[in-house]
């Protein structure tokens, strides 16, 4: 039996994909960040079909390092959080909006698997609550990025899943006394040192690699 040539397989795959390109809507979460860091980092997003192969993508990532219990006697210190025994207690929010351009690879009546590329704009803010905000200030950032990935959405089961990699470039126009950018939540909520950081151009990968959600 003669196997079909790679070119024929590519044409058949393209013809199958072209049979189903309806826009879709999905709500999703990126679960790796809270699982790995074990802190409050919750990236949630919406993909909203504008046209076949074109989706509006919005993502919000609130994050916070919740204070640890104080050791016995620490309440009497002048600043019981000065040595990080309370955690950094940083709070922040990252927001992105972009357009994803897709190319279906495999498709059936109720599901589709495809590639996408999504340029996006980004804004981020981080601060400390209460009196500590007077010392640390507030960090603001603006930037842009590009995500690429493989996604699957199934109307029948309601499942949405994607594997995503990306890069982003941001610039802080008021970094306060934070050493890390507000758009890096895993670092901001860790107990690494916080020192004066000048405004700088930051290029970093997007570490949220997996999305899981619901098609509606």
Image (cartoon, rainbow, N blue to C red):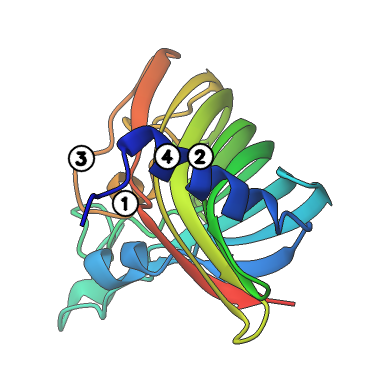
Residue at left offset 42%, top offset 12%: 200
What separation in Å lies between label 4 and label 2 (alpha carbons)?
5 Å
Numbered mark located on residue 8 in the image: 4
Which residue is at the front of the view, 120 or 181?
120
Q: Determine whether the residue tagged by mark 1 lies in a helix, strand or loop.
A: helix
Lower position in the chain sequence, tag 1 or tag 2 = 2
Residue that label 3 marks: 193
What separation in Å lies between label 4 and label 3 (alpha carbons)?
58 Å
Q: Determine whether the residue tagged by mark 4 lies in a helix, strand or loop.
A: helix
Q: Determine whether the residue tagged by mark 2 lies in a helix, strand or loop.
A: helix
- Judged by depth in the image, the label closer to the viewer, 3 or 1, is 1
Which residue is at the front of the view, 76 or 170?
170
**How many numbered markers are drawn?**
4
Q: Are marks 3 and 1 in contact (CB under 8 Å)?
A: no
Q: Residue furthest right?
A: 50
Lower position in the chain sequence, tag 4 or tag 3 = 4
Q: Judge whether residue 178 can be spotted in this image.
A: no
| Residue 49 drawn above or below residue 7 | below
Lower position in the chain sequence, tag 3 or tag 2 = 2
What separation in Å lies between label 4 and label 1 (alpha carbons)?
46 Å
Q: Are marks 4 and 2 in contact (CB under 8 Å)?
A: yes
Residue that label 2 marks: 11
Q: Quadrant of the N terminus?
A: bottom left
Residue that label 1 marks: 186
Residue 61 at x, y percent in the picture: 54, 56
- Left/right of residue 87 with respect to residue 90 in the rendered view: left
């Amino acid at each position: 039996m003669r196997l079909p040539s790679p070119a024929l397989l590519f044409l058949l795959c393209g013809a199958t994909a072209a049979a189903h390109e309806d826009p879709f809507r999905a709500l999703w979460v990126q679960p790796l960040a809270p699982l790995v860091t074990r802190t409050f980092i919750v990236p949630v997003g919406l993909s909203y079909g504008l046209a076949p192969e074109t989706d509006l993508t919005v993502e919000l990532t609130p994050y916070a390092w919740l204070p640890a219990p104080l050791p016995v006697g620490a309440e009497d210190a002048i600043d019981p959080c000065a040595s990080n025994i309370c955690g950094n207690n940083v709070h922040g929010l990252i927001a992105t909006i972009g357009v994803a351009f897709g190319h279906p690879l495999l498709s059936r009546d109720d599901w589709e698997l495809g590639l996408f590329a999504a340029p996006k704009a980004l804004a981020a803010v981080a601060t400390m609550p209460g009196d500590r905000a007077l010392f640390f200030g507030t960090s603001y950032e603006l930037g842009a990025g590009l995500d690429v990935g493989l996604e699957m959405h199934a109307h029948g089961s309601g499942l949405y899943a994607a594997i995503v990699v990306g890069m982003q470039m941001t610039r802080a126009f008021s970094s306060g006394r934070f050493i890390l950018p507000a758009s890096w939540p895993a670092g901001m909520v860790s107990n690494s040192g916080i020192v004066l950081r000048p405004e700088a151009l930051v290029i970093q990968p997007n570490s949220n690699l997996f999305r899981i959600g619901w098609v509606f």
